[in-house]
Image (cartoon, helix red, strand yellow):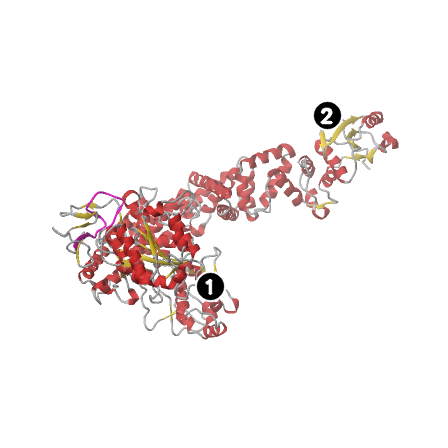
Amino acid sequence: MTDVSTPPPSVGPAIIRSTVDGLAQRGFPPGAVALRAVPTSVDWSGMSSNDVPIRTATCVSALQVREQLRQRTQDEWLVIFTDRDANDLGTGVLAHLATGRVRGVDVWESVSETFRATQLAPSLTSMPDARRIAMGLLSATPVSGGWPAAPGGVLTREHALDSVLESSLHVDTSQDLSQLLAWSVADESAAAIARLRDVAGDRLTEACLDRLAESTGPSRAAVRPLLEADVLPDLAARGIVLGVLTDEAQQSADERVDARVALARCEEWWGHDRPDAEVTRAFGAAATDGLTRLLAGSRRDHETALRLIDRADSLLQKVGGAELAELSDLLPSSHSRRARTLARALTAMDQSGTLAEVEAAWAALERHRLVERFRADNDALRAATRLARWVSTPTAEIAAGGDSGEVLARHSRAHLDVGGWVDVALNAASVGVDDTTTTARGIEHMVHRALERREEEARHFATALAAATRDDAGRSGAFGPEAARIWPIENLLETVLAPVSTQAGPSGVLFVLLDGMSVASATSIADDAVGRLRWQEVRVPGSPEGSRRAGAVAVLPTLTTISRASLFTGRLTSGEQAVEREGFTAFVAARLKHKARLFHKAAVDQTRRGWAVSPEVAAAIDDTGGTPVVGVVLNTIDDALDRSDPGGATWTAESIKHLEPLLLRAASAGRTVVLTGDHGHIVERRDGRHLSPGTVATSNRSRERGGEVRQGDEILVEGRRVVADDQRAVLAVSERVRYGPLKAGYHGGAHPAEVVVPVLVLRPASAEIADGDELPPQQPRWWSGPVTAPVVAPESAPAAAPARGRRPRAADPGPALFDIAPEPAEQSRTLGAAVIESEVYQRQTELNARLTMKESALAALIDEFAAARGHRLPPVTAAQTLGVSLARLRGAQEQAKQILNVDGYPVLRLDGDAQTLVLDVDLLCEQFGVNRDR
């Protein structure tokens, strides 16, 4: 019973509603309830509980109470405020009250009822100013549904405050910091805090913000002052700034001094409650981690993170820490500074700089999290880094042994394996960056260095081409020996189409000629066909196992009317489409005893609405029985040389008109596809010059014989494969030279990009491919990352010695220009060889006798890991090392795991990105009882 000597308290809407809601939850029907309270003239009528209206009345006598009871209707709650006790009211009045008594106003009892609790935890009721917190909880009670029930009937501080945070501030303390940071910057969050203060009062609001700060763990003291409504939007940005300023592990001595000065300027963020250094460091690290995860989240989270990062960049400059921005993996200004650092390293390579400095600068840039925002700049800088790796490899002399045809084959193979990829990097780097100062100049410098080397290579290639043409070295049907064979393009039907057609059998062949497709163009087309469209690139039937992508040498001059006509007729000639159709169908009929059709641009373009492929072409592809061989000519690349930007374009099956639907149709029919060109092309880089031909120019890059042959810029070619009246022509060699008007690109000359033609053989994803037939990724090693020398294991190393650091790379490691790895010294033994020779390896192979992985491939993989930075390999490098395609890499790596992961220990594993492979070299050495050189 309430003590009558205690003055009755005042009441308000929160107590009224919580009292009625509590009775309703306990099963009481609408009725009357009397509260012992100070009589007031305020009428709180107008509220409701579960849609039942609440009427209030103040009564100073028993008579007034009786009158209000008499007036109450059955569909309302009546709440009476009175200072009369039970004796004054009498049993007759009490009998009409819901609980049969005058209820004392106990705010914690009301709080218990709203949370459906039977017990209050001391952590809640003992809070400072607990009554105000209780009143705030009642005032903030959601109108619909009330508070969530207390777990186990015990209402704790955590449950009460978390309920308010979720209901009023729309934040969940169980979320990670990234979500808290996203909440802090939302427009409605600061307003929600202000509304909570208005509704529930300062004390409950402060308690809720304390609870929210607690959820950040060690960062609590730094976070709590920043949760106020006026500074809340800068919570994440300030955390990022602190992450930069307190990361001493990344700072030099001078940078630490600058960081301390900037931190002193940050003290005003906390006023007199500045947290200690450990707390600010924890908050900075947590905010950086939270923003990183937010960046990787949904599109909305990503956009939120970008706004926060931009704000952090501004704040860092405001506190004088702009020079430290480069230490951050998140700030936009950091990306710009790292890009300039890389550009300076690229420029310095001619003087005191090293490739190692370029690699370190690129690694820092690659770690930056704003990949999408700076994708175009990153592409150009990545390409410049690749060029730096390439120009750092020694220029290998092409062996002069053998006849002129063998020398030409080796030069052509060098272009297929390396030179074409250099051209891709040159094209990408030449696109440039949105920065006309240091960064752009660094890229420009590296492009010029690479072009100088390419010009030298082009001169050597042209010399070999002229010699082989003069000697008629391709008259036997191929240049070079079987292992490095390059075909004259007029022999492709015999050397490629015929064996492919025989192997394909009743499924047939689709022979696609992309006019003007260079080796560089083919790199992205092949990647798209194999990666996105799931084709399998295989070696040409009959070529040696371990062969790389095939190639051919165009007829001279490298013009469509000559080289394409010669390809489709199987003989040296010139002509237009009619000659090509007649020659193609005649060859297939005579050599393969099949019917063939060849479609040129007009027939392919004549599509009906709704048809991705011309109905006539589609029908021919579908008819594998009636038309086993179908040829199609596509002109997109060659057309771009007149009107577009072939250097800035990334050629794919999608960007080449009709190619993707043709490939899809061929896959559906089960056809094998041969994809080739008639000649390549060079790109106009706007630094060339016009030469007067002196005689008749037969193209922008070729002229009739006569006048002086300008050494270095031109070369005279003569012989049977020069389709001209006198079997002689002068061809441009330097890609900076042209005889005609300025265009986007050219062909006709003797540059390897014009002469060497890639030949791809593709089989559908559903086709069964024999082991050794599928080609691995074709990129040179420097394309995917630094090229490293194998780690050598000492012969006398004790078993199970601890692993040591990576062996320094020699000053002249050699992979040479053509990416040929140097042979280790005869007395040295690589780590991979040591593992293969160990007793543990022998036991593992006996336990896994059905595995097909070759010892040499596994040893090479171990050596590649041992030399790689962090012992990590991207999928492309792993596939190349094992000699498998990317599609078969997963199976190969599982076989490697079965051998290397002794007793299930994770010697070889996938990284968190589910792509990068990681080798624990220390564990490998321990498990196999080998050591490696320190």
Q: Nearer the viewer, residue 481 or 283?
A: 481
Taking the view exactly as shown, the residue that stands out farthest to the left is 707
Give the residue type that dot 2 points to: Val
Q: Quadrant of the N terminus?
A: top right
Q: Is residue 289 above or below residue 816?
A: above
Near-viewer residue (599 or 54): 599
x and y percentages locating residue 845 in the rendered image:
47, 73
Q: For residue 785, what is the image quadrant?
A: bottom left
Residue 352 seen anywhere in this rendered image of the structure: no
Three-letter residue code for mark 1: Gly
Residue 736 painted magenta: yes
Q: Write the start and end of the magenta stretch as one range.
A: 728-747
Residue drawn 25% across the image and 65% down it: 480
Quadrant location, the C terminus: bottom left
Label 1 crowd (10 A; few <14 / some 14-19 / many >=20): few
Asked where in the image residue 57 lies, by quadrant, the reply is: top right
Q: Which mark is residue 891?
A: 1
Helix, strand, or loop for circle 1?
Answer: helix
Q: Residues within 10 Å of mark 2 (few under 14, many from 20)?
A: few
In the drawing, does residue 892 fall left or right of residue 417? right
Q: Position of residue 83 (x, y in %)?
A: 80, 29
Q: Is mark 1 in CB contact (under 8 Å) with mark 2?
A: no
* Mark 2 secondary-structure assignment: loop
Q: Is residue 642 left or right of residue 2?
A: left
Q: Residue 280, percent across and down?
A: 51, 46
Q: Nearer the viewer, residue 256 or 329?
A: 329
Q: Which residue corresponds to the image point at 68% horizontal and 45% vertical from the top-left?
A: 156
Closest to the camera, between mark 1 and mark 2, is: 1
- Percent position (x, y) of residue 242? 48, 45
Residue highlighted by disc 2: 42
